[in-house]
Structure formats: C-alpha cells, structure tokens
Image: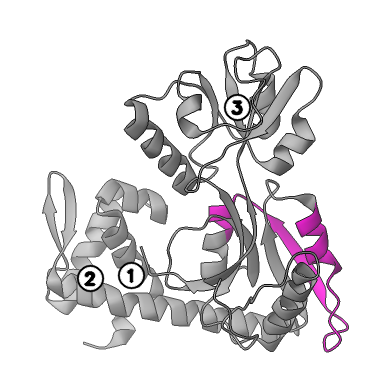
Amino acid sequence: MTAGHFRIRDFELIVALHEEGNMTQAAKRLGITEPALSQQLKKIERRIQTHLFERGNGGVVTTGAGRAFVARAMEIIQAFRRAMHEAHETKHNESHRLRIGVSSFHPLYLMEMLRSIELRLFRNLSLEIVTAYSLELLALVQHYELDLAMVTSPPSNAQITSVCIAKHPFMIAFRKAHPLAERASVRLEELLPYPWVFFSRNVHYHLHDLILQRAKAESGAVGIRHLVSQEEQAIALLTDDQALAWLTPAGAERVVHNGFKCIPLVDPHIRLDIHLVTLANNKSPLVSEYVRSFMKRIEEQRPPMQLQLPMGVGVDTSLRPWPIS
C-alpha cells in the first residue's frame, strides 16, 4: 500500500468522523451525504485492512488503530494546507499582505488600531480585514485563511498561540424602570429572577455554554426569553420592565439609548477577554513585526505589562499556548 492511494479528502473524512463521533454530524461537516461517507470509510478501511471506528447506535468510537491514524492524518492535513498557503503567497507575490480577522463585537478603537499600524520594514504592506464571529475567525486562522485574528475568550487549542490585549465585563441592559436600575453593577445570581435576551450559541458557543452552566448551577433554570445574533436586536426586544439583555461594552455604547440603562456584570469567570491570535507554528517575519508594533501601541495606552507572542517578539507571562480541547 502506498500513500498515493489516499487523497487529502480521505484524511479530512477520518478526522471529521473522529472529532464528531457521529456519522450524521461528520457528513454534514464535510458537505456530503451519510451514505457517501459510510461508503468512503469502508473503502479507506479496506485499503489499510484495519478498522478505524467501531459503529453503534450512539455513533462511532475511534479504535486504538484509528487514534494513531487520526494523529498522522492531522499532521498531513496541516502540512498540505500550509503548502497551499505558501504556494499561493509565492504565486501572487503577496508576502506584504496580511489577512486579519476582527469581530463587530469588538471596540472600534482596537479595529482602528489594527488598520493604522505602519511597519518600517514592510512599507508596502496592505491589510485585508475579514469580519466574522470570534470562533469562526479562530477556525480561519487554523485553516491558514487568516494570518492573525482578534477574538474574544477563545477556547483551548494547541495549534493557536495568543496574547490578551483587553479585558471587559459583560454589560447588562434594561429599561430604566427595571428593579436593578439603581444598581452600579450586578452579579450573576442577581440576574436569575428576570427573563433574558441572550446571545445565540452560534455567536460564541464557548461563552454561551459557560454562562448557562454557571447560571443553572446557581438556580437550576434560566429564563431565556429571546436568543439574538445582533445587539441591536437585543435592545429592540426589551419590551417590558422585567427583561434584561446581555451586551458587549462596544455594543452597549452603540445601541443603548434614552429610556434604557446599562451596568457591568461583576464576575471573575464570565468576562470578555480579547486576544490577538495566530498559529503557534507561524514563523513569518511580517507577522512578528506587525504583532510587535501592535503590542507596542497597546502598551502605550495602559500601564506597562510584559507581552509576547512566541514567534520571535519577546517573552510574556500573559501569553498562553493552549492545550488542545
């Protein structure tokens, strides 16, 4: 058997099935039908004469041989994507172009700062800004479709390295006649008696799940009245004096108007921590120089901190390469 019998798509199929643990979800992720996935898996297992998965009513479980195969498949997929990325850069002579992801939920001053960075060694630098939800941006970085991204509270991932550039509380909005309107700040348990206008899970599943888990641990139930994907929608749905809405500081500044009030949520575990992220194996001098200049600009606007991305721009205690989840 030679590696020539396999396509990158075959490796992607095995990895997707391992990560999803379910034929239906893996097929949906790959954009194919479940029968087509099952047929291709059988072909792959026949080629290597080894069962990679055990099938059952609850889904599929990766075998020992399957786990070993998945580990190598992941390496092959990453190497292929990197090769494609570098070939594209060389073909189009785009070594002085950076693709940076940002979210509309981030403060405008951070996005403006990203756009205003000028590099002495890369005078012809052009930026391509891509907007999406934070975790979508994180996936684009992993797939070599972005060089850098500014994301909120990213979950653990060994392929990504990051530095925290800002920490903000959630803002809780309600009508001025709300029972909490006289408070200067609020704790999570104080929100539980009231109906929520909450952000949809697709906006940020990690924060969404974390908040609901902590809320349910406090009270056993959470009264979510509406789920929204835009903060303007949240304010429009505060139609009585009992409901409250979860907003980012940038969103609160943008959408809260007369007749409403916004106060910070004080909670050490529920925050909006904004990170600048890139691939842990990114060795680009351009990316390093850009990050160095950006962090210098950040440091000029706050008390001195030791900050670093581990790619040739210094040592930093606030930087963390995450373990894979």
- Cα–Cα span, label 2 and label 3: 50 Å
Residue located beneath label 2 in the image: 44
* Residue 45 image point, x, y percent: 17, 70
Between discs 3 and 1, the one toward the N terminus: 1
Name the residue located 68 percent from the left edge and 46 percent from the top edge: 105
Indicate which label's residue lies in the foreground, 3 or 1. 3
Residue located beneath label 3 in the image: 245
Name the residue located 45 percent from the left edge and 29 percent from the top edge: 189
Name the residue located 71 percent from the left edge and 30 percent from the top edge: 232
> Quick check: 239 left or right of 36?
right
Mark 2 falls on what kind of element? helix
Q: Mark 2 is on which residue type?
A: Ile
* Residue stretch rendered in magenta on the structure: 109-137
- Is any atom of residue 33 visible in this view? no
Name the residue located 46 percent from the left edge and 45 percent from the top edge: 205
Quarter placement of the C terminus: bottom left
Residue located beneath label 1 in the image: 10
Vertical position of residue 272 compared to residue 85: above or below: above
CB within 8 Å, label 1 to label 2: yes
Vertical position of residue 151 compared to residue 320: above or below: above
Between discs 1 and 2, the one toward the N terminus: 1
